[in-house]
Amino acid sequence: MRVERMSSFYWTAEGFFMDDLFQAANGDGPLYADKHLVVTRTEMPFGLRFAGEIDISNSDAVGRVLRAIFPDGDTPHLDLSRLSFCDISGIRALVDAAADLGDGGRLLLHGLPAQLQTVLRVTGWSELPSLVLCQCGAGHEWISSAGMAVSSPDHRGIDASGAPFEAPLNVPPAGSGEVPFDSESLLAMRGVASRFATASGLPATRAIELVTAVNEVATNSVVHGGGSGVLHMWENGGTVRCDVRDAGNHVAPLAGREGPGANARDPRGLWLANQMCDLVQIRNSGDGTVVRLHVKAA
């Protein structure tokens, strides 16, 4: 189905829907159109495509379209890649429509523009189980839907898909613990990390795993990162985070992601940290390398 934005395709100030909606559902015409927005149906994957802008002038109509098209318990896809703007009222229409799907129903949102991603994250709506922010197709040009190969609306290409993994990490919050270390002070550093992990509510087993991971990464800093480094520690939302920063400036692209080889001398530190932590992030820049470890309390 070929769909383009049609800035003059509308019947009234509110566009059209309801009776015309059900007629258009079986044809190639838009399900809804006004001077800002065009909504069309997609068959593979099943759902809707939005092109244009959603604001207070048409958000109610968008909600009516969503409720009329999708039955309870459904899992429709919404292609938002051509949506250039969506305000709070528009996002609330999506949230309410997702809630109206009932138990098991979810809206799968594809191709979210940066503005929409930001608003969903700041409002906390991105955490709702009834809204799924689909990024799985970002690195895949083709995905499977209903047993058929279809073009992924989220596909961004290799460079764009890898960009989030190269973006700088946010700096540790003010007041986060800071512990300089070198080869002579690894023991003291482990003690500080252990006490912080326990005080932050990590169970004993998880605290031991975090301290082990911190020690392995810090040892890499001593051996490969200029002989010293700095450990930062903080807790947020039930997750303990530790940054190990050093002056090293070379990290293999898959460091810690590949299992160690058969040779007993093969490096294992970063790989071990990945096994013991919920998430390990590595960033490298001209100022050195930072490895961020995340461990959840539960």
Image (cartoon, rainbow, N blue to C red):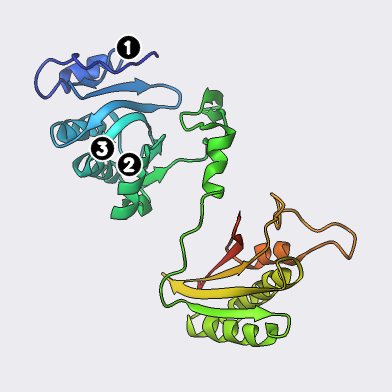
Report how far apart the C-alphas of labels 2 and 1 lie in the structure: 29 Å
Label 3 residue SS: strand
Q: Quadrant of residue 279?
A: bottom right
What number is the disc on residue 267? none
Asked if residue 127 lies left or right of residue 159, the reply is left
Q: Secondary structure at mark 1?
A: loop
User: Which is more N-terminal, label 3 or label 1?
Assistant: 1
For residue 28, the mark is 1
Asked whether the residues under the numbered discs 1 and 3 touch, taking CB atoms below 8 Å apart as contact, a structural biologist would say no
Tell me which residue sits at (25%, 42%) in the image: 91
Q: Residue at x 85, y 57 (%)?
A: 261
Q: Is residue 200 above or below residue 250?
A: below
- Residue 1 lies left or right of residue 242; in this view the side is left
Horizontal and vertical percent position of residue 133? 41, 43
Instruction: Give the labeled residue for mark 3.
Output: 86
Residue on which the image places disc 2: 115
Foreground pick, 189 / 36: 189
The answer to whether 9 is drawn above or below residue 212 in the figure is above
Q: Amino acid at mark 1?
A: Asp
Q: Amino acid at mark 2?
A: Gln
- Say which of 106 and 206 sits in front: 206
Q: What is the C-alpha distance between the residues marked 1 and 3? A: 25 Å
Q: CA distance from mark 2 to mark 3?
A: 8 Å
Q: Residue furthest right?
A: 263
- Residue 247: quarter of image: bottom right
- Crowd tier of the residue under label 3, counting other residues whose Cα lies within 10 Å: few below 14, some 14–19, many 20 or above: many
Mark 2, mark 3: which one is toward the viewer? 2
Task: Name the amino acid, label 3.
Answer: Cys
Disc 1 residue crowd, few under 14, some 14–19, many 20+, Cα 10 Å: some
